[in-house]
Amino acid sequence: MLNFESRFLKCAGRNIHFLEGGNPDHDAIVIWHGVTGTCRDHVELADRLSEKYHVICPDAIGCGLSDWIRDKNTEPGLTFYSEVARDLLKQLNIKKCGWIGSSKGGGLGIILANIMTECPITHLVINDVGPGLPEWMRTAAMKNIASPPRFDSYLQFEENLRQTLSRGKLNLPDHKWRHLALTWSRRTDDGRITFHNDPALAFQFTHHPHDFNLWDHYDQISIPTLFIRGEYSLVDDQEADAMRTRGPKCTIFNRPGGHISLMDDVTEQDVILDFIKTEHPTQTGENHEQSYG
């Protein structure tokens, strides 16, 4: 990411790290990662977008180089995330933006597309996330985040990451596994290796149940919305059908793989770029689904 600068700003009272690239005079695009990701998850998409857009990729609270959680009752939830995001965009003098959000970043986009009037989102891309999430999925995610495993070496961590995410249908070449493992790891006080993120992010799943029922926000959205759905998605057919007929009546793009995606496939990127640059008419919810793979 030769054209990106690593920056820090204090937003909603917390130190936030983000990558910024492209021309600040061009239209802005925010890429917001998933619950335990980092600002470097989608570097290839960010690089392509930076050729024509002003691109901002934040580390969310508890992730990457941003501050960890201070208050488990508020900070892991999307309400506080919204405050951080709005303050960041205000300080960067962004008047409108496109939003590309994976998983939790997509949930944040759903909320902001409804409430952020001072910096309207013009195009919303949500990667394998819907307005809801079943209880069993929340419980599983909470346990994994709250008690991350520790490894004696970095190579053990990388191999575990490969095995775990491969079971979730993520398929990457060796150099991309290495990139992901490097950006998702940190050394502990006892010299071992674990996941980079704050385990307190798990409190979102116990303290913020409203984050997993966002239909009241989704139904108010009227901007063009693209839902990228994995072949092995966390969003079931019933919810996907509802997303296509309610609120913004999203376009659905079906991709191979599971929930986690680096959005590094050229075909998927082409779909995103075409979607963002196009002026969309009001959608009817009919015939808005395409697939590849």
Image (tube, rainbow, N blue to C red):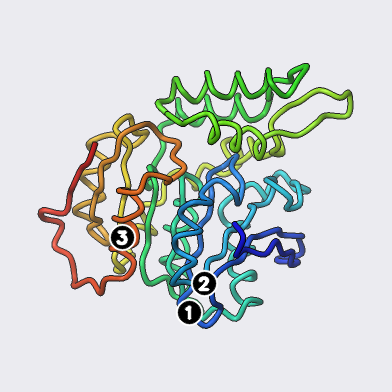
Q: Give me the C-alpha separation between circle 2 and circle 1.
A: 5 Å
Q: On the image, which quarter does residue 49 sit in?
A: bottom left
Which residue lies at the image location 34% right of the left edge and 33% below the top edge? 233
Which residue lies at the image location 60% right of the left edge and 32% below the top edge? 178
Q: Residue 268, how many percent across, how many down? A: 32, 48
Q: On the image, which quarter does residue 7 sit in?
A: bottom right
- Is 169 displayed left or right of 224 in the figure? right
Residue under numbered circle 2: 54
Q: Earlier in the sequence, mark 2 or mark 3?
A: 2
- Number of other residues with Cα within 10 Å of mark 3, as a class: few under 14, some 14 to 19, many 20 or more: many
Which residue lies at the image location 58% right of the left edge and 57% below the top edge? 79
- Number of other residues with Cα within 10 Å of mark 1, as a class: few under 14, some 14 to 19, many 20 or more: few
Q: Are marks 1 and 3 in contact (CB under 8 Å)?
A: no
Which element carries disc 1, helix, strand or loop? Answer: loop
- Amino acid type at circle 2 is His
- Amino acid type at circle 3 is Thr
Q: Residue 64, how many percent across, how many down? A: 69, 47
* Mark 1 or mark 3, whichever is nearer to me: 1
Q: Give me the C-alpha separation between circle 2 and circle 3.
A: 20 Å
- Amino acid type at circle 1 is His
Residue under numbered circle 1: 26
Q: Are marks 2 and 1 in contact (CB under 8 Å)?
A: yes
- Number of other residues with Cα within 10 Å of mark 2, as a class: few under 14, some 14 to 19, many 20 or more: many
- Farthest left residue? 287
